Image: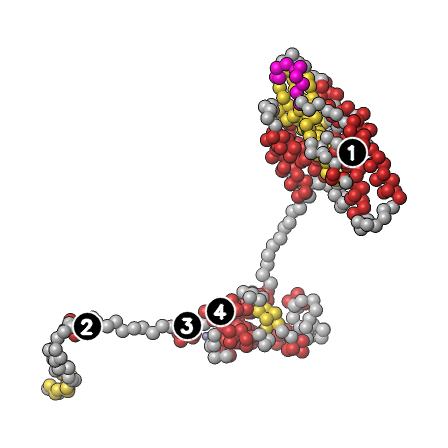
C-alpha cells in the first residue's frame, strides 16, 4: 500500500514518510503478515489512510518556467537537505531569474529515506541527507534539458557545514566516506546555511499529513527567501567556528612507538646448525644455570630458565611427550627438526619425511617447508645429481652410405698395448 502511492518525483514524499516509519516499526516488532497489530499502530495506520483521498487536491503547474517569464538570465538549482531521527531527505528547486529581474521557483524533485534501525547520530543523518542532495543534483544535471548555471546546497546543520568546510582534520571512516561523495559532487563554497523554519526539507525528514502538505506553500514553491534577491538570503551563523578537538567524528591521532628486539633465546637458537647440537647446547645451558644456583645458593624455586623464555603456562615433560607439537613456518627450529628427521629416515623424499614428522609435530605449511629444507641437503644434492654424458664423435661417412654391398669397406681394429722393452724401461706400443 505504502509503495503503491504513485510518487515518482517525490511530490508527496512527506506524506509517505509516516507510513514507511510505521512499516519499519512493525518489522522491528517482528510481526507476521497475518498477525493483528496493536491499537496504537492501528490508529496511526487509519489516520494515514483517511488522509490519502485528500491527495487528489494536490495540484502543481506542470511547467517549470511560466510562459509569462521573459528572457531567462540565470537558472540555478537549489537543494535543501535535512534529517531527523525518523528520516532524512532532500528536495530540489529550480530558480529562474529573468532579464527584468523577475524571479520564479519551481519544485523539481524530492527524495526521502528512513533512518536506519540502528541508532545513528543526528550529524551523521544530516550528512547522509547532504549526500542525497548531491546525488539528486548529479541526476538532475544529466536529465534536465536546461542550461544550469549553478547549484546551491542548503543545510540547517552547522556541524555538516563545518565538516564540509574542514580541510585539515581526518574523520572516522563513515563520515569520511560521505564527505568524499559530497566533495566529489560539490564545492564547499556551494554550501549555505538555512534556518530550520525556512528549510522545506524539514517536512520530508519529519513526515507530514496531507493537510499540512497542502497548506505548506514552502514545499511546492520553495522557501520565501528564494523568491527574493540574493542579498536577503539567510547568512551563515557567526558562531560557526572550526570543529572542536572533542568532536566524536574526528579520528583520534595516536602515536605508536615500538622497538623490536630479538629475544635472547632466539638469537641463541640461530647459532646452531643441527637439532642435535641445539639440544646439547640447551642442556649445557641448563646445567650451567643449575651449577650457578648451587654456587650462589639461590632459592630452590629458581630451577628453570627465566619465565620470559616460556609461555605463562609451562608444560610438563609428560605433556610434551604425548602432545603433537605445532611448529611455526620458516622458523629455524622447524628447519633443524625437519633436517634431523630427513637424516633419520635415510635422506628420503618430501612425503616420507612429512609423514615421519607428523607422528610428533605439526608444521605450518609443512609440505612446502620440508621441500625447501630437503632442497638444501648437500648429501641429497650429490645423490640426485644428473650423471655426465660422453660426447660421441659423428659416425664415419662409410658407415652411413647406403646401397653398397657387404664388406665394401673393411678395416682392422687397433691392437695393443704391447709392452716393448727399450733400454732399461718398458714402454707401451700400439698397432
Ligand atoms: Zn638429504
Q: Which mark is residue 15?
A: 1
Circle 4 sits in a helix, a strand or a loop, which is it? helix
Q: At 68% from the left edge and 35% from the top edge, which residue is drawn? A: 132
Q: Viewer-proximal residue, 214 or 350?
A: 214
Q: Viewer-proximal residue, 90 or 4?
A: 4
Q: Which residue is mark 4?
A: 371
- Going from N to C along the chain, the mark reached first, 4 or 1, is 1
Report if the beta carbon of the residue with label 1 is closer than 8 angstroms to ligand 1: no
| Quadrant housing the N terminus | top right
Q: Are marks 3 and 2 in contact (CB under 8 Å)?
A: no
Q: Examine the rendering and report whether any part of residue 166 can be seen.
A: no
Within 10 Å of the Cα at label 3, are there few (<14), some (14-19), or many (20+) other Cα atoms?
Answer: few
Specify start and end residues of the magenta stretch as a single range: 64-73
| Quadrant housing the C terminus | bottom left
Report if the beta carbon of the residue with label 3 is closer than 8 angstroms to ligand 1: yes
Q: Is residue 254 above or below residue 281?
A: above
Q: At 34% from the left edge and 74% from the top edge, which residue is drawn? A: 387
The answer to which image quadrant residue 366 occupies is bottom right
Magenta region, main secondary structure = loop
**Alpha-carbon span between mark 4 and mark 1:** 71 Å
Q: Position of residue 287 (x, y in %)?
A: 61, 76
**Is residue 311 toward the left or the right of residue 1 in the image?**
left
Residue extending farthest right: 39
Q: Which residue is mark 2?
A: 395
Specify whether residue 71 is painted magenta: yes
The residue mark sitting in front, 4 or 2, is 2
Instruction: Name the colouring of the figure.
Output: secondary structure
Q: Are marks 3 and 4 in contact (CB under 8 Å)?
A: no
- Going from N to C along the chain, the mark reached first, 1 or 3, is 1
Amino acid at each position: 500500500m505504502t509503495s503503491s502511492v504513485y510518487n515518482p518525483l517525490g511530490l508527496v514524499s512527506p506524506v509517505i514518510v509516516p507510513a514507511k516509519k510505521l512499516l519499519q516499526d512493525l518489522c522491528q516488532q517482528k510481526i507476521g503478515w497475518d498477525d493483528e497489530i496493536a491499537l496504537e499502530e492501528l490508529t496511526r495506520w487509519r489516520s494515514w489512510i483517511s488522509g490519502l483521498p485528500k491527495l487528489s487536491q494536490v495540484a502543481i503547474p506542470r511547467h517549470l518556467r511560466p510562459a509569462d517569464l521573459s528572457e531567462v538570465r540565470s537558472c540555478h538549482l537549489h537543494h535543501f537537505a535535512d534529517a531527523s531521527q525518523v528520516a532524512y531527505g532532500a528536495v530540489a528547486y529550480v530558480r529562474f531569474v529573468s532579464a527584468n529581474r523577475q524571479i520564479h521557483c519551481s519544485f523539481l524533485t524530492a527524495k526521502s529515506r528512513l533512518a536506519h534501525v540502528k541508532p545513528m547520530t543526528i550529524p551523521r543523518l544530516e550528512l547522509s541527507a547532504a549526500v542525497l542532495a548531491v546525488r539528486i543534483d548529479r541526476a538532475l544535471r544529466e536529465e534536465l534539458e536546461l542550461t544550469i548555471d549553478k547549484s546551491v546546497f542548503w543545510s540547517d546543520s552547522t556541524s555538516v557545514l563545518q565538516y564540509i568546510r574542514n580541510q585539515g582534520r581526518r574523520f572516522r571512516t563513515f563520515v569520511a566516506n560521505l564527505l568524499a561523495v559530497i566533495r566529489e559532487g560539490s564545492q564547499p563554497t556551494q554550501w549555505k546555511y538555512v534556518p530550520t523554519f525556512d528549510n522545506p526539507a524539514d517536512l520530508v525528514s519529519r513526515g507530514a499529513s496531507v493537510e499540512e502538505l497542502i497548506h505548506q506553500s514552502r514545499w511546492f514553491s520553495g522557501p520565501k527567501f528564494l523568491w527574493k534577491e540574493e542579498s536577503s538570503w539567510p547568512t551563515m551563523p557567526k558562531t560557526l567556528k572550526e570543529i572542536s578537538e572533542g568532536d566524536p567524528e574526528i579520528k583520534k591521532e595516536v602515536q605508536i612507538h615500538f622497538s623490536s628486539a630479538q629475544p635472547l633465546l632466539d638469537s641463541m637458537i640461530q647459532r646452531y646448525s643441527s637439532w642435535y647440537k641445539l639440544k646439547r647446547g640447551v642442556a649445557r645451558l641448563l646445567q650451567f644455570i643449575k651449577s650457578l644456583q648451587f654456587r650462589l645458593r639461590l632459592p630452590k624455586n629458581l630451577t628453570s630458565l627465566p619465565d620470559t623464555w616460556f609461555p605463562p603456562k609451562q608444560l610438563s615433560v609428560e605433556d610434551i611427550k604425548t602432545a603433537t607439537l605445532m611448529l611455526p613456518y620458516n622458523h629455524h627450529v622447524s628447519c633443524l627438526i625437519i633436517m634431523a628427521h630427513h637424516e633419520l629416515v635415510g635422506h628420503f623424499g618430501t612425503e616420507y619425511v612429512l609423514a615421519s614428522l607428523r607422528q610428533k609435530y605439526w608444521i605450518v605449511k609443512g609440505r612446502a617447508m620440508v621441500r625447501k629444507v630437503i632442497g638444501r641437503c648437500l648429501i641429497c644434492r650429490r645423490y640426485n645429481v644428473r650423471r655426465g654424458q660422453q660426447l660421441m664423435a659423428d659416425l664415419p661417412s662409410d658407415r652411413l652410405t647406403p646401397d653398397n654391398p657387404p664388406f665394401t669397406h673393411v678395416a682392422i681394429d687397433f691392437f695393443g698395448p704391447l709392452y716393448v722393452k727399450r733400454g732399461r724401461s718398458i714402454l707401451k706400443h700400439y698397432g
